[in-house]
Image (cartoon, helix red, strand yellow):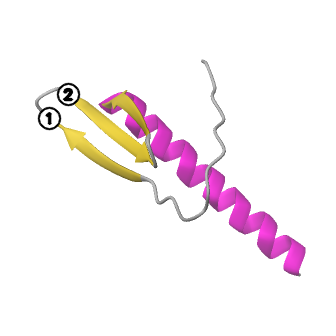
Amino acid sequence: MASLSLGAFKHLQPSATSMPDMGIVVITVGCVSIHLESAEADKLAAELERAAKQLRGESQDAAA
């Protein structure tokens, strides 16, 4: 799997929309668009949720 890291400012809100006629999900952050098939979007959503939960757990551990 390839990876790409782009500098993004916090004020750039990511958005996701579906394009049923093309069978893809489009994630947009600023001027960057990522086109994913539905299975890829599902996998990414699960990974984002896992990472967010891990971050919250580590933040709570550090505060304790």
Q: Residue furthest bottom?
A: 64
Query: Who's the residue at 72% across and 61% down the image?
Result: 55
Residue nearest the viewer, comparing 3 with 12: 12
User: Is residue 51 covered in magenta?
Assistant: yes
Task: Please name the predominant secondary structure of the magenta segment in the image.
Answer: helix
Residue 48 image position (x, y, % from top left): 55, 49
Image check: 23 left or right of 28? left
Image check: 8 left or right of 38? right
Q: Residues within 10 Å of mark 2 (few under 14, many from 20)?
A: few
The image quarter containing residue 14 is bottom left
Residue nearest the viewer, comparing 6 with 41: 6
What kind of residue is marked 1?
A: Pro
The label shown at residue 36 is none
Q: Are marks 2 and 1 in contact (CB under 8 Å)?
A: yes
Query: Who's the residue at 54% across and 65% down the image?
Result: 11
Q: Residues within 10 Å of mark 1 (few under 14, many from 20)?
A: few
Q: Which residues are magenta?
A: 38-63
The label shown at residue 23 is 2
Distance between the Cα atoms at labels 2 and 1?
5 Å
Q: Residue furthest left?
A: 21
Residue 39 image position (x, y, % from top left): 36, 29
| Secondary element at tag 1 | loop
On the image, numbered disc 1 is attached to which residue?
20
Query: Who's the residue at 63% across and 29% down the image?
Result: 4
Quadrant in which the N terminus is drawn? top right
Residue 5, above or below 49: above
What kind of residue is marked 2?
A: Gly
| Secondary element at tag 2 | loop
The image quarter containing residue 61 is bottom right
Residue 5 image position (x, y, % from top left): 66, 35
